[in-house]
Amino acid sequence: MPAEIRTVTDIHKIGETDWDRCAGPDNPFVSFAFLSAMEDSGSTNADTGWQPFHLMVTDEDETIAGIVPLYVKAHSYGEYVFDWNWAEAFERAGGRYYPKLQAAVPFSPVPGPRLLIRSDHPAPDRIRKLLIDGLSALPERLGIATLHVTFCSSDESRALEDAGFMARTGIQYHWRNRDYGSFDDFLGALNSRKRKNLRKERKQVLEASYSFAALSGDDLKAEHWDRFYQFYRDTSDRKWGQAYLTREFFDLLHQRLRDRTVLVAAHRDGEMVAGALNLIGSETLYGRNWGTMDRTPLLHFETCYYQAIDIAIERGLKTVEAGAQGEHKIQRGYEPVLTHSAHLIADQGLRNAVSRFLDQERRHIAQDRDFIIAEHSPYRQNAD
């Protein structure tokens, strides 16, 4: 059957029903609710350097069969798969690296699907190929040098590599629920030294008179979001120099995803002093943002990591993904996993240089992951 490949600059031109038929229910970050909150709040637009440019495939009956959340980028901020050196080298050689195309969830280093296909489609492989063909054609058609698909699934990465993209890997640290009934059950799977250290850290925070609440649904109030936005702005301004998410984004997130949102609020002396925003998937708790005005040591670990483990155990979730980077997560029970991205570069000289770099990077990352598992795992050998 003939199909049409198109792009749109407004997610509402696709609509919630068609978008979510392709995105599915598992990962909230690719849902219409989350991505439309980004657009409607002014967090993703041309002014922020994240212009929506979503690609879609429609069948002959004009039914939307596949979608790629896609953006025209004016910079490389908010991606967590760094290509600054590629851009610098290309522009030093006289090329124009920006604008570029980015298939991603903005400001969110969350692995998940990027080639969104209707689960009930009779020919999903065909739609995937059409989505990849559409992506591959865009740089030449638009006169853009590069296209990047970041934090995609491993099978998407392989399919894109087969189509001429270059594969890249990274490392994140995720916690895995081994059917624990409680946090103490989790501690029992650790070796003695790590188990004592985690108990000591949690005890220190509690003895410092902090209390914690996991707020979701109607328990979340405007005052919680007001306070959390203060924390978010402070952390963003200190670490990155710019906060992309507007205050309105959090209101829209609350309206559209309140039952899949958990805000861990830390209180001391009756005042909310820190918060960690999480979203709930079908099997995973996703750590999103963290912020505080309180610089007390260990507060970050408790609010972001240990409270997340408590929530995952209580809800029977299989995984906690606590964001990018962070080797300090290893000793707290989070294990190294590979992340995947795929990159299309039109200029042959830049492509050759990046290809050599990625070959070396993949080997080093694989070696690092194997070494961490073999030498630094906090788990007892028989924990599985």
Image (cartoon, rainbow, N blue to C red):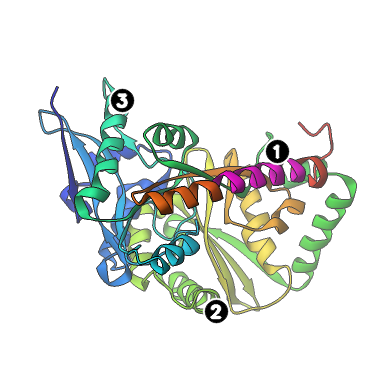
The residue at 54%/44% (across/down) is: 339
Q: CA distance from mark 3 to mark 1?
A: 38 Å
Give the magenta-colored segment's residue range: 358-372
Above or below, 269 against 14 in this view is below
Quarter occupied by residue 212: bottom right
Residue at numbered disc 2: 238
The residue at 65%/40% (across/down) is: 176
Percent position (x, y) of residue 2? Answer: 13, 26
Amino acid carrying label 2: it is Arg
Name which of mark 3 and mark 2 comes first in the sequence.
Answer: 3
- Tell me, yes or no, whether the highlighted magenta stretch contains residue 359: yes
Q: Look at the image and tell me whether residue 290 can be seen.
A: yes
Percent position (x, y) of residue 312? Answer: 60, 45
Percent position (x, y) of residue 344? Answer: 37, 46
How many residues crowd around disc 2 within 10 Å: few (fewer than 14), some, or many (20 or more)?
few
Residue at numbered disc 3: 124
Amino acid carrying label 3: it is Pro
